[in-house]
Amino acid sequence: MKSKSAYRFMSIAFVLLLILIACSAVVINYFMYNPSEADTEINMGIGETYEYPDDGYRIRFYSYNKDIATIDKDGVITACSKGTAQIAAGRKRININVLDAPESVEIDEKSFSLGVGEEYTLAPYIPNSELDTGFQYNVSGDEAFTIDKNGKIKAIKAGKATIEISTYNGKTVSCEVRVGNPPEKITLSANSKTLYMGATGKVYINIPADCASKKTTIESDNEKVITVNSKCELTPISVGSATIKATTYNGKTAECQINVVEKPYYIRTDLDPDKPMVAFTFDDGPNSPTTNRILKVFEKNNASCTFFIVGERTKSKANAECIKRMVKNGFQLGNHTYDHLHYGSDVTIQDITKCADRLNDLCGFGPTAFRPTGGFMSDVIKKNCGAPIILWSIDTEDWKTRNADKVYHRILNEVKDGGIVLLHDIYPTTAEAIEHVIPKLIKNGYQIVNVAELAYYKGKNLENGKIYYSIK
């Protein structure tokens, strides 16, 4: 007969064995049935199925709301009706949000280009829905790329193909993908650019025609001065300099130096660079009765223009007040020589500088554009005008016809985006034509600007002594 101590030892051993088995069960259950990921949510449409990922472990599945979503022993979830169900996958809990079945499917980019070796993942979506699963991808066309079940594309050779994206219930949308060669170089639309505080700007990335790079990034090296977004839109933050750098997926780069400065009084910062613009210019003034009449039209219509001033004409008090009004209300001053007596090679340095000095003395601002009398040029003018030389693309001949109706129709018939209109603010008939043509052009979608504004919004840096007929 065994002693009591032996029985006690066997009892303790048995209890310890039971504890060991229980602990082993807990450990096995934890590692076998409880994946380490946190609980998640899945959005599904009514009638959609989804297979829970197989991670190599034996997992038990259960649905707590079988009228909304069911799950079989293999982890296949079926969305039955609208609502929220909770699914158990081992010890993990998954919320299944069942939404209405898709009525359509969309993709933001219906066509785009990739470079060989570049990768990109499509992002189809269901309008007005949070559904983000159940998409299938079918490709037709050149074998230019591969695409996996998640919509990830890898470009492998030049060519193009169409991808049809379909939902689980048969709604479709298509996009075309072109594959080009990897860029050997890229450029920006400018090597340097001046932006004014309060305005915005844009640069354009140029890639050779047979090449492509969808994942071209662009960044500023000094975001305290200027920021740039993925659309290459520039926003000045403070006065200073910064470099904008664009980089392709294969490491090709291009740079643009941006200088941010305070804006001149004659530049407006609220214009739309994507809408057509035309610059109006007036020669031979000021002439108080007609010039003020013209100024009133431009001010009333939130428009601007450039006045090419004859310095001698500012001697009268009324005409001098016109100049001050121009500066106060943001019109650009131009130089049209001091007395308009000399043409071409007869124009002297003094003809130019005397007018500029007169404007500076009168209003504190000098001319920022030059127009030669009669449009006649000379080397003296080019070397000494101290400003861009502005000619014209539309000659209204208002000085010849003295007919408001003819001036009106000539402008409307010849106006184009980037054009420069030649007029004279000393004629009543010109003032009458302006009263009608400015509102008409604005109604037709044009922005009426001065020459400096036209150049700024067209991204052109005008050079002193260089001739411009239009700015596009």
Image: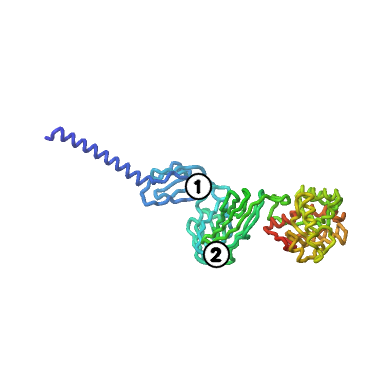
Q: Residue at x 85, y 53 (%)?
A: 287
**Residue 421 lies in quadrant:** bottom right
Looking at the picture, how far across and down is residue 135, in whole percent? 51, 54
* Label of residue 183 in the image: 2
Q: For this view, does 248 lie left or right of residue 449? A: left
**Residue 64 lies in quadrant:** top left
* Residue that protrudes farthest toward the front in the picture: 350
- Vertical placement of residue 33 versus 118, above or below: above
Q: Residue at x 80, y 50 (%)?
A: 323
Does the image show residue 300?
no
Q: For this view, does 153 lie left or right of residue 244? A: left
* Label of residue 320 in the image: none
Q: Nearer the viewer, residue 108 or 292?
A: 292
Q: In the image, what residue type sits under mark 1?
A: Asn
Disc 1 element: strand
Looking at the picture, how far across and down is residue 240, in whole percent? 62, 51
Looking at the picture, how far across and down is residue 168, in whole percent? 51, 53
* Label of residue 43 in the image: 1
Q: Nearer the viewer, residue 316 or 433?
A: 316
Looking at the picture, how far across and down is residue 99, in whole percent? 53, 46
Category of crowding for the residue at label 2, using alpha-carbon neighbours closer than 10 angstroms: few (below 14), some (14–19), many (at least 20): many
**Spatial distance from mark 2 to mark 1, Cα to Cα?**
40 Å
Q: In the image, what residue type sits under mark 2?
A: Pro
Disc 2 element: loop
- Vertical placement of residue 19 versus 133, above or below: above
Q: Residue at x 77, y 66 (%)?
A: 378
**From the viewer's perspective, is the residue at label 2 or at label 1 nearer?**
2
Q: Residue at x 54, y 49 (%)?
A: 101
Q: How is the image coloured?
A: rainbow
Q: Quadrant of the C terminus?
A: bottom right
- Vertical placement of residue 467 versus 123, above or below: below
